[in-house]
């Protein structure tokens, strides 16, 4: 089986490559090898390699960078996805596009209650994302399914996991680092009480990817279910280790943001994720 992987230099893509490279024939071209924002490049790459599956992780995922340069975000996140999906249709390749929970980042409606606004998101609800990144990911989903209807779209949560030395040198940091500092150093950490979202162990996503590319075509929330703020989730998790007193509430914006998703559709298809608390406790105990 042949797998083509874009974005293998990223957090998720690099781990997908290391996990599947010895099991399948995996080609993970770098940006220098493949600029998929040029349609002829995308068509030739897919046509020459003839992959059975294309895992599309390549994107500009820095939300701030997308806001600063929306034209570049459009070219990479939307048009690049369109060109790859179009090429996949020509070769009969199953395309798996990595999308984001940011498509659910919207304003609260004028007559909407807080309870209604904080309800976990479902794949079939209308989306009107605020950030450029979220808007472009939504457009990319539409382009992907329009060009290659036999595509699987995965709306991913924020992910955590042990960082490599190179990632640390680049200044990367995720939730696992912050919780590790609490337990190892007794260092207090602050978390938002208004940011509601799921977070998932990256290796759960990696291990479930093989089942994901066998799903029926469509859009799937893909990650740990969560119903609470980051502050609540972390504090509840730290109770297991007797360190909840080191978890502080961040002062700041009072505006709510709800990115929590229900993975019910994914679960019905036989793919299951630990809850955020279960995943974090398992990771920290390991």
Image (tube, helix red, strand yellow):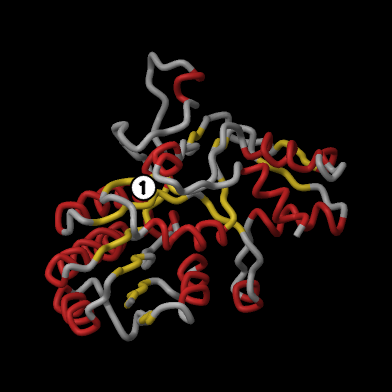
Q: In which quarter of the image is the C terminus?
A: bottom right
Horizontally, residue 193 falls left or right of residue 256, namely right
- Please tell me whether mark 1 sits on a helix, a strand or a loop: helix
The residue tagged 1 is: 134
> How many discs mark residues in the rendered view?
1
Q: In which quarter of the image is the N terminus?
A: bottom left
Horizontally, residue 97 falls left or right of residue 250, namely left
Residue 190 location, quadrant: top right
Mark 1 Cα within 10 Å, few/some/many (few <14, many 20+)? many
Residue 9 in view (yes/no): no
- Tell me where residue 150 appears, x and y as whole percent: 21, 56
- Tell me where residue 202 appears, x and y as whole percent: 55, 59
The residue positioned 32% from the left and 31% from the top of the image is 125
- Tell me where residue 136 appears, x and y as whole percent: 29, 52
Return the residue nearer the eye: 117 or 217.
217
The residue positioned 52% from the left and 77% from the top of the image is 18
Residue 253 in view (yes/no): yes
Residue 233 location, quadrant: top right
Horizontally, residue 263 falls left or right of residue 229, namely left
Horizontally, residue 268 falls left or right of residue 228, namely left
Rendered view: 16 above or below 127: below
Return the residue nearer the eye: 226 or 81.
226
The residue positioned 66% from the left and 66% from the top of the image is 162
Residue 251 location, quadrant: top right
- Tell me where residue 246 appears, x and y as whole percent: 83, 43
Return the residue nearer the eye: 207 or 175.
207
The residue positioned 26% from the left and 60% from the top of the image is 71
């Amino acid at each position: 089986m042949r797998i083509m992987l874009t974005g293998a230099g990223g957090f998720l893509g690099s781990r997908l490559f290391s996990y599947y490279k010895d099991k399948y024939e995996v080609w993970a071209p770098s940006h220098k090898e493949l600029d998929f924002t040029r349609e002829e490049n995308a068509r030739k790459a897919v046509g020459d390699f003839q992959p059975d599956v294309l895992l599309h992780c390549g994107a500009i995922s820095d939300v701030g960078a997308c806001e600063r340069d929306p034209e570049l975000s459009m070219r990479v996140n939307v048009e690049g996805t369109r060109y790859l999906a179009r090429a996949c249709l020509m070769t009969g390749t199953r395309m798996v596009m990595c999308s984001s929970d940011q498509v659910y980042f919207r304003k609260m409606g004028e007559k909407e209650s807080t309870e209604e606004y904080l309800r976990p998101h479902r794949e079939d609800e209308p989306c009107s994302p605020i950030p450029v990144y979220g808007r472009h990911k939504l457009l990319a989903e539409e382009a992907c399914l329009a060009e290659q209807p036999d595509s699987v779209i995965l709306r991913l949560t924020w992910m955590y996991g042990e960082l490599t030395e190179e990632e640390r040198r680049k200044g990367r940091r995720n939730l696992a680092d912050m919780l590790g500092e609490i337990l190892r150093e007794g260092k207090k950490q602050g978390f938002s009480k208004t940011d509601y979202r799921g977070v998932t162990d990256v290796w759960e996503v990696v291990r479930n990817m093989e089942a994901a590319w066998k799903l029926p075509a469509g859009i799937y929330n893909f990650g740990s279910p969560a119903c609470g703020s980051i502050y609540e989730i972390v504090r509840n998790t730290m109770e297991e280790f007797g360190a909840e007193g080191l978890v502080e509430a961040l002062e700041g914006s009072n505006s709510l943001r709800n990115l929590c998703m229900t993975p019910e559709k994914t679960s019905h298809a036989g793919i299951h994720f630990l809850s955020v608390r279960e995943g974090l406790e398992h990771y920290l105990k390991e």
